[in-house]
Image: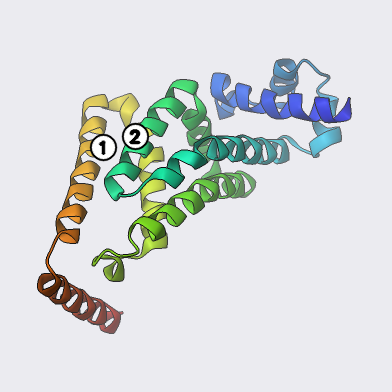
Amino acid sequence: MSGDTRERLLAGAIATLRDKGIAGTSARSIAAAAGVNQALVFYHFGSVDELIIAACQSATQARVALYSDQFAEVTSLRELLTVGRSLHEVERAAGNTQVLAQVLAAAQQNAILAEAARQALNLWINEIEQTLQRILSDSPIKAALDIPGLARGLAAAFIGLELYEAADPESSEHALDALAQVAVLTEVLDDLGPVARRALRNRLRRSQAARASDQ
């Protein structure tokens, strides 16, 4: 029964964040969504913030696992962005991206919720980074890329588009199209002959050295 109550509270926290936003998320509203006494929030998690952290972690782990096979089948940056676009649409329709956006908004003033957002985002980032390392392993541009930074940038872009879409859906779509164009550019670079690839690597190395000397 204790495990069942805990799971109901985790689900209740996600449902409350999705339906009421962070401002409407309290021990009372979560308990109502879970169908339990609100005292159980504190018994199992100590505080509402700790419950939100656990709920975000649990929900994100489940969502990442759901898409792991799709990530594993990706063979190019274009395919990765296609998966990301599909994932974005599904998660947005289910309200899951909105949940993370709510936590991110609250994280600006709450260090505990900032940690919840960081942990949840890192689960997605780790999956994206592993995929990037694999698909770009033979690419001439890999030497010039900060792959961990790129993974974080892609994750942040898709989360940010959730907020952008509410204000300007058409421009949000254009932003996704622009990312797809970058993917096409990497394919063009990958198709270069050996001499051109060697020249590109040398140019990228010089660019990296110049950036390092400026820092």
- First in sequence: mark 1 or mark 2? 2
Q: Residue at x 37, y 45 (%)?
A: 74
Whether residues under marks 1 and 2 lie with C-beta atoms below 8 angstroms apart, the answer is: yes
* Furthest-right residue in this view: 1
- Indicate the amino acid at tag 1: Leu
Q: Residue at x 26, y 32 (%)?
A: 172
What x and y, as percent, mark residue 65? 57, 39
Residue 204, above or below 23? below
Residue 148, above or below 156? below
Quadrant assignment, res 134: bottom left
Residue 31, above or below 41? above
Q: Residue at x 30, y 26 (%)?
A: 167
Quadrant assignment, res 186: bottom left
Q: Nearer the viewer, mark 1 or mark 2?
A: 2
- According to the picture, the residue beneath numbered tag 2 turns out to be 85
The residue tagged with tag 1: helix, strand or loop? Answer: helix
Residue 149 visible here: yes
